[in-house]
Structure formats: structure tokens, C-alpha cells
Image: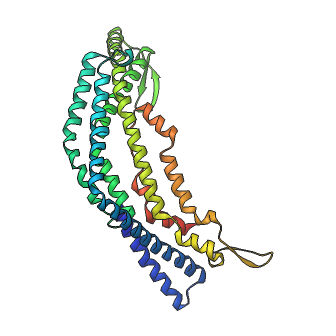
Amino acid sequence: QQMDVRIEQLAILLRQMAALRLRKGGGRVEIYSKEYTSFFNTVWLILNDITIGYAVGKFLCENHEVLATMLEEFVEDILIFWPQRALCWLDSWPAGLKLNTELSSFYSGTFVDLVNVWGGQCQMAKFFPDLLGGMGGMTMSIALFYDMFVFFTLHIYVCYVIAVVAFEKALWGLGSLWRLFRGKRFNVLRNRTDSWEYDIDQLLFGTILFTLLAFLFPTVLAYYALFALLRLAMILTQASLEIQLAFMNHFPLFTLVLRLKDPWRIPGGTYFDFVENQPVTFNRIFFQYTRLWSQLASHYHPFRLLKSLLLGRLLVPIPGSEIRYDKIGNHSKES
């Protein structure tokens, strides 16, 4: 994704260079001023990104042995051993919560085996500090670390998907049987709940199924809650990395320096009381951050995440298309 952003930045630079050449042929001053500021802002972002990435890469290369050991211990302890201990704890009737023995043993055994299978792949963690060498800039290192985090937590995501499917089906089954007891059924064609008369055999069979689901549901809920919390922690970690990438790709460095050093070079409007040019405001300088923050805040809103957890919906990170560099650039042109 970050390579795609870098390519978009280079494409924007080429487009802005063509716009700047039009000034020599008598182009409009306001267009030239906007393209000039945007062009050098992108250049400064890329150069500073590469400089910071080189410094961080130098640090990683000089301490790669210590960092590799720390990363390997962290992955084994937090991503492998801790989920296994949590699963064994749930299988031993924790805090007096008596789960269904057979179903709990099936859940625990299946998830522990999945974690063990992926645990052998996590031994490659010691090689990743060498890969995060700062090549391509600091943003590229953060993007590589993001991909590394997704790779090492893949087993947790697989367990989470299995737990979500079971929890969602259990909720759906309980909801359907609850409508049966109330003499209701869901009309698929009209997308509503209608009244319906059930036979004695249907009610008896529904009672048996409802009893089974009611007794099995606490076990399903317990294992779902475990992996839902782990997935929530993963989503928050990915969100923090995405915020860092988005802000580093859109920071108005050159515009901010001009605003502080020579504010009259970035006009923001004219006041007719004195008929003089006024510098652009800080709100307009950081308008990209406002758009990015609104998109990130709407996707990672606590109430939205809580609703998804309660309804058994998959928690997914924000799509890359929502925070693309060129998309934000197009918004800036429209504003």
C-alpha cells in the first residue's frame, strides 16, 4: 500500500511540474501558487521521510541482534504462549463459570492446535529487524512493520473468524426460535416479521433446539469474547500504524513553514476594508488532517466497534481506498 502511495506521489509531482511550466506561458497566478506550494510540500515530505528512515534504519542495523531477540521473545510469549494459556484457563471452568465440557474441550483443542501450527512460522521474527532497514523512508518501514504484524497475528485472526461464525449462527438460531415461541416468523420477501401459527410438533422441536442452544451459548460466548478482545487489540494497533502513515503522507510541512516564515506567500483571501491580502489560516493548512481524522474516527468509533462486537460482525481495519494519497489530494483541489 505504501509503495502505491509513493507512486501516486511521484505521479502528482509530474502533474504539478507540468502545471508549473504553464506559468511561463502566461498561466493564472492562483493556480501557479497552489501548484507551487503543493509541489514543494510533496518534495519536502519525500526527502524528510527518506532522511528519517535512513536514521531509523541505521539504528536498526546497529542493534539488530538485540532487537531480533526481543521481537522473537515478544512474539512467542504474547502471540503464542499467552493465547494458549488463556484457552487452557477457559477450559478449566474459570471463576466458577461452568461451561459445557465437551464443547469447551473441542473449542480449546481446536484453537490450541491452530496456534501451535502457526507458532513454528513465528520463528522468522528474528529476521525482520534486518528488513526494516529504512529503505524507501520511514513510512516504508512503518508499512513493513504493519505487514509483519498482520502476518504474525494471522492465527489469531483465523481463530477469531471461526469464533465469530459460531457466535453469529448461535445468535441467529436463538432469535429464530424466540420468534417461534412468540408465534412470529420472518418474511424474507417483505423483510418484516409476520404472525404465524405453528403446529405442536414444530413448537416441541423448537423447544428442544432452544434448550440446547441456551445451554451451549455461554461456552460459545466465552470463546468468542476471548478472541474478540484479541482482535480488538489488533485493530487498535493497526489503526495506530495507519494513523501514523496517513499523517506522515499528508503533513503540510512546506506550507506550515511558509505560513510561519513568510505568510504573505500563501494568500488565504482578501478583506475589502483595507484591500489587502490575508495569509491562509491554519485551519485551511491542516484541512487534510481534518478529512483524515473524520474518516478514521468514523471507522474506529467506539460505539461502532462495540456494536460490531455485540452483533458478531467482523472487525476489519479501514480500507486503504478511504485514506489514499491521491484521493485526499483530489479533495484538496475541490476545496
Which residue is located at x 46 percent, y 62 percent?
Answer: 248
Residue 121 in sight from this viewpoint: yes
- For the residue pair 141 and 11, the one nearer the viewer reads as 141
Q: Is residue 295 left or right of residue 105?
A: right
Look at the image and tell me in which quarter the N terminus lies: bottom left
Q: In this view, does 292 lie to the left or right of 281?
A: left
Which residue is located at x 36 percent, y 30 percent?
Answer: 226
Residue, far bottom = 25
Q: How many marks?
A: 0
Res 169 quadrant in image: top left
Q: In this view, does 331 lie to the left or right of 56?
A: right
Res 316 quadrant in image: top left
Tell me where residue 9 appears, x and y as whole percent.
41, 70
Res 264 quadrant in image: bottom right
- For the residue pair 71 and 187, the one nearer the viewer reads as 71
Residue, far right = 273
